Amino acid sequence: MKKLFFVPALAIAIGMASCGGNSEKKTETATNETASSTETSEAAETTVPGIENVTLSNQWTVEGNDQMQFNINLIRVKAGEPVELTLKNVGSQSKESMGHNIVVLKPGVDKATFGAEAAAASDNEYIPKSSLSSIVAHTKLLGPGEQDKITFTLEKGVYTYLCSFPGHYGIMNGQIVAE
């Protein structure tokens, strides 16, 4: 009789122990998932490496040169407020061979696709009419010693800017982080 009582009691004890262990594992998993979710949220807020070292300002001057380079590749602005961006072409080559502009693209626009469309838009200073809905703002195409200022407002997010002169977008580009 003792054996008949002992076996069911043992089965109940094992069952209860395994359920208790399971609930602890579920709590641990839930805690880990919450921590992961928090880390992911924080990572999303700092999506651009080095942005914490960039001054927050809504007035920027970017220079483009004959080596197809911008002197600034990372800009930090306050979202919802006007941004004044000045482009200066500090090069000496002609506008026809080394013109520069800045085109601020909406988030998610593919640089390569936009650059290919821009290369075919010589009649419109390399601003493709077919992609106007992808553009936040742009300067005019500048020759040596020229400058142009644009003013625009950005919502919170990360925006790419580039020079749309043929072949320049791959090197002459940067990011604007609006926070």
Image: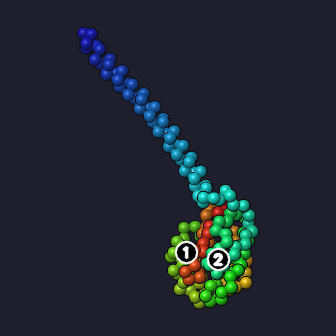
Label 2 residue SS? loop
Q: Quadrant of residue 144?
A: bottom right
Mark before the other along the chain sequence, 2 or 1:
2
Name the residue that disc number 2 marks: 102
Relative to 13, residue 116 above or below = below
**What type is the residue that disc 2 sits on?**
Ile
Label 1 residue SS? loop
Q: Nearer the viewer, residue 35 or 133?
A: 35
Name the residue that disc number 1 marks: 170
Q: Nearer the viewer, residue 72 or 40?
A: 72
Residue 91, how many percent across, how many down? Answer: 68, 82
Q: Residue at x 39, y 29 (%)?
A: 19
**What type is the residue that disc 1 sits on?**
Gly
Relative to 36, residue 80 above or below = below
Q: Quadrant of residue 64?
A: bottom right
Q: Can see residue 25?
A: yes
Measure how far apart labels 2 and 1 are at the Cα level: 13 Å
Q: Is residue 32 left or right of residue 58?
A: left
Task: Give the position of the C terminus as an image quadrant.
Answer: bottom right
Q: Nearer the viewer, residue 100 or 2?
A: 100
Q: Residue at x 60, y 72 (%)?
A: 173
Q: Can see residue 150?
A: no
Q: Residue at x 29, y 14 (%)?
A: 6
Q: Are marks 2 and 1 in contact (CB under 8 Å)?
A: no
Residue 36, how many percent across, how many down? Answer: 52, 46
Q: Callout 2: 10 Å neighbours few (<14), some, many (20+)?
A: many
Foreground tag (2 vs 1): 1
Relative to 161, residue 121 above or below = below
